[in-house]
Amino acid sequence: MDFRTDKFRQIMPTLFILGIIFLLLHLASITDVLSIISKPMVVFVVKLVGINAVDQGNFLLLGKLMLPWTEDCSGINSLVMLLGISLWVNRQNIISWPSLLRLMLCMPAALLANLLRVLTFAFYRYTLYPSWESQELHYFIGFMWLLPFLVLFVPDFRHKNRNEWLEIFYMAVLLAMIAPTVFSPGGSLVTICSLFYLAHNRMEAADLPQKKILYVFWVISAFLIAWSRMESLWIPWLLLCPRFVASQILLSWKGIIILLGTISLLALHTTWQIIVMVTILIYGYGIIKSERVNYNSFSTTVKIPEFLALIILLLSPFLLQDLIGIRYKIERPPPGVMKQQLSFNSYKIRVAGQPSDISMYWYGAFNEGRHHSLPACMRFKGIILKEVENIDNIYFGNQKWMQEFFIHDKILKSSYSEYLLSSFSPFAKPGVHIIFEAPSKTMSPAYFAQESKRIAAHLYKIYVEAH
């Protein structure tokens, strides 16, 4: 490939920007640095309004309110979104003083947006908790506080037309949905495939008659996803937006395989990861060999009714699920186990014969329906787990061994992939998430795995007898 060709100059800005966004999404170490700054900011502002505030490490004590401090609270998602949007909208003229200034402003803007987000949740929890809260609500509040800052990072924002603002809004929503999935099983593949589609999705040049039919199916599918709480389908749903989706990519076998790579249920399987990555490489080779690069572009301005309708519809992943989603009854630990209630849906439990240095936790359903994987759950608490080599389903993090089990349809599941497959039906009940942990200094991972399996089997026996 000739690096001096117009084709190469057209491809490189997009590849470069998407590569940076991918790296930013994976730089978890930034969170510690951001927390050093963002925590004192929250404490200072709360004290400024006359409320006593104390930093207790994993949580903030704001008056009588105990606010858990997770990785999301550091402002990492806000920073990634602002940097990603700033890089994207300035990609054709990135080496200029205005563009560089916008990049430098991303950090203080992200910290300020995050401060407003944390204070909003503190107020929410103080006044309404636990009447209505979900991860989608977390994402939505963070997303909404970012919108006022977009004008700082979009050049000539007053002269942007509705098409350009809609593209920016679309990208912001997608990044807000992608960021929390990065460290879940298969999250890197979901991110790569999502960025692949984002690089091609543009405003279509013409209003085709078929668009109206596609919009009907797209809207109906949003209600089905929200009702059934199949939250893993929101990213492909966004990528299939009729106004943006690159039809020449979607209507090819390569595009369909890459789109399926954005579904976490498939992305967590090694075989499928290999298939999707090979497909992306084949597509990339085809781009290099082709004569030109085709991107959708727009020539007519989107009409105001469609513009407003799309803005509302693109917020569906944040709001619709909480409004119409199925509510599940919380399962309590069965009689015959010792239990200490930690929250409205979680317990610390013990069974006969359980070693004192191994802790077991029971999590019933919450508003989201299906449970997240153990690494994803701990990620929300600011702890990064790593898999232990040569021992299946054992994780290490925060100086502890950890393992998860699930009870779904009255069957004990020993891995998250088994749980996802058994709960694949849109109307499947979420079941129960069982988590074990033990100090890594007191035992080997092999012993912990053996004992956890034994205790889980004992608990399952008690559960079956009670049902």
Image (spheres, grey):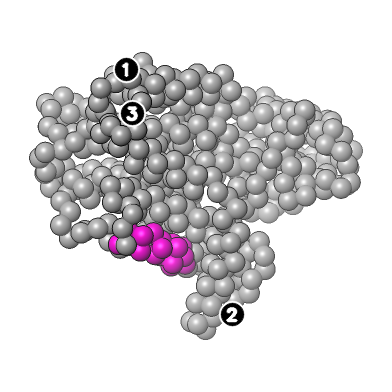
Alpha-carbon neighbours of circle 2 within 10 Å: few (<14), some, or many (≥20)? some
Q: Are marks 1 and 3 in contact (CB under 8 Å)?
A: no
How many numbered marks does the figure carry? 3
27 part of magenta stretch: no
Q: Residue at x 70, y 52 (%)?
A: 341
The residue at which mark 1 appears reads as 252
In this view, 351 is above or below 117: above
Q: Over which residues does the magenta segment extend?
A: 98-117
With 65 as the anchor, is 168 left or right in this view?
A: left
Quadrant (top left/top right/bottom left/bottom right) for the C terminus = top right
Estimate the x, y position of residue 416 in percent, counting from the top left.
63, 30
Q: Residue at x 50, y 31 (%)?
A: 189
Q: Residue at x 15, y 38 (%)?
A: 298
Residue 52 disc label: 2
Estimate the x, y position of residue 199 in percent, counting from the top left.
33, 36
Query: Of 263 and 195, which appears nearest the observer?
Result: 195
Q: Residue at x 25, y 34 (%)?
A: 6
Q: Is residue 466 visible?
A: no
Estimate the x, y position of residue 138 in percent, counting from the top left.
46, 53
In this view, 371 is above or below 419: below
Residue 2 disc label: 3
Residue at mark 1 to residue at mark 3: CA–CA distance: 27 Å
Q: Amino acid at mark 3?
A: Asp
Of badges 2 and 1, nearer the viewer stands: 1
Q: Is residue 80 visible?
A: yes
Residue at mark 2 to residue at mark 3: CA–CA distance: 63 Å
For residue 350, what is the image quadrant? top right
| Secondary structure under the numbered disc 3 in the rendered image | loop
